[in-house]
Amino acid sequence: MLDRFRTTGRSLVVAVLTAALTTAGLAVPAPAAAAVTRAQLALRWAPIHYQDVDATGSHALSGRSDYITKVDFDGDLNGRNNWDRTGQAGVSLAAHAYYSVVETSTHWYLTYLFFHPRDWTDHPFFETEHENDGEGVLLVVERDGSDYGVLRAAVTVAHTDFFSYTPSGSTWSSGRESVDGTLQLQSSPHDGFAHPVTAQEAKGHGLKAYPQYNINGDGIVYYPSTVAETPSSGDDRDVRYQLIDIFAAGGLWAQRANAGLFASAGTFAGDDSGDCGAGTYDCTTNSANAPWGWDDGNDLPGRGQLATDPAKLAVEYFTIPGALSRTYTSNPYQS
C-alpha cells in the first residue's frame, strides 16, 4: 500500500509540472526512459529566490529598484538607458531570470543570472551605485541515471566574491576553497519539487544561499515557473518568475558583441546619465557583468569560468569523490 501511495504521489508531481510546461508551450517532461530537455532541467533546479527590498530614498523607486527582471524590460537592448527607464511609466518589471546548461558525461552545470536595472544606494558617503546589476549562482548536478540527477553543490556570486555551498547529505566537501554553508532546499507550491533556496540583499544585490542573506522587513519570494508575474508591491511573498535561455536565438549570448548592451566582453554597458550618483558618492560606469564576466579575483578559476568552464571551477572549489569528467558534451560558451 505504501509503495502504491509513493507511486501515485510521484505521478501527481510529474502531472503538475507537465501541465505547467504544456501551458507555456514547452515540451512536456520526458518519461524516465528518455532524457529531459535542458529547459526542463533548468526549471526543475531553478532556485526559490528571496529578494530583500528597501523602499527608502528616491533611487529605490518605492522598492521597484530591487525587482528582478529581464535586460530588455523596457523594450530595447540599450544598456545605457536602463537606470532612467526603470522609473518611467510603460515598462514591465515582470520577473525573469536567465539560465545556461553546460554538460559533461558525469554532470550538468546550471548557471542562473538574476538581473536588476539598478545597483543603488541611499547613503551619501563612500558608497557608489551603477546602472545594471547581474549576479547569480552555479548549481552542479550529478548525472546519476535519474531524470533530473542529484544536486551536489552551488557557488554564488556576491559582487566580486564567490561563495560555495553543499546541500545536506552531499558527498562533496571543501577543496581549495572552504565550503561556506549548507544549501537549503524548499518545496515549491507551484510544482511540488524541492528547489535550492538563494537570496539577494537589497540595493547592491549580492547573492548567497538562504539564510546567509534574508528578507529584512519588506521583500519578495520568487518561485521558478513558466510565467512571469510582476510583484504587487515590494512585500509580496509569492511571485513566479520565468526562465530565459542565455543561448536562445537572439538571446544574451547571441548579443554578446552588441555594443549597445555590452561595453566589453561580459560587461554590461552602463553610464552615469540621469540621477545615477545624485546624492551619493558616485555613479560608476560599465560596472555589471554577465555570467561569462563573473570573477573572484582571489580564487584560481579565471574570469567567467564559473559559467564557461564550470567543471574546472568545481574541482578547484570542492573535494569530489568518484568520477568527474572535464570533457564537455555540450558547452555553447566554448563553441
Image: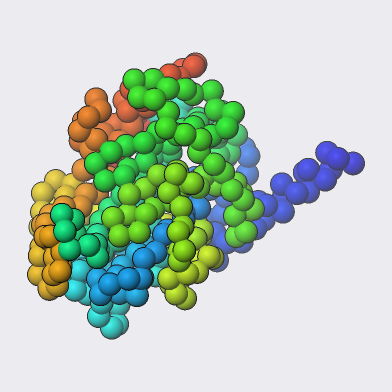
Of 20 and 316, the residue lying toward us: 316
Of 48 and 192, the residue lying toward us: 48
Quadrant where the image shows the N terminus: top right
In the rendered view, would you say 164 is above or below 129?
above
- Residue 3 is left or right of residue 46, and the answer is right
Residue located 44% across and 44% down the image: 212
**Quarter-of-image position of residue 304:** top left
In the rendered view, would you say 83 is above or below 175?
below
In the rendered view, would you say 74 is above or below 251?
below
Residue located 30% across and 60% down the image: 203
The x and y percentages for residue 70 are: 32, 63
Of 330 and 274, the residue lying toward us: 274
Work out whether residue 61 can be spotted: yes
Work out whether residue 256 can be spotted: no
Residue located 10% across and 65% down the image: 272
The x and y percentages for residue 264 are: 10, 49
**Number of numbered discs present?**
0
Residue at the limit of the structure toward the bottom, as seen here: 89
- Residue 227 is left or right of residue 191, and the answer is left
Quadrant where the image shows the C terminus: top left
- Residue 216 is left or right of residue 281, and the answer is right
The x and y percentages for residue 261 are: 16, 59
Residue located 43% across and 49% down the image: 213
Q: How is the image coloured?
A: rainbow
In the rendered view, would you say 218 is above or below 28?
below
Residue at the limit of the structure toward the top, as seen here: 322
Of 313 and 250, the residue lying toward us: 313
Residue at the limit of the structure toward the right, as seen here: 1
The x and y percentages for residue 49 are: 46, 54
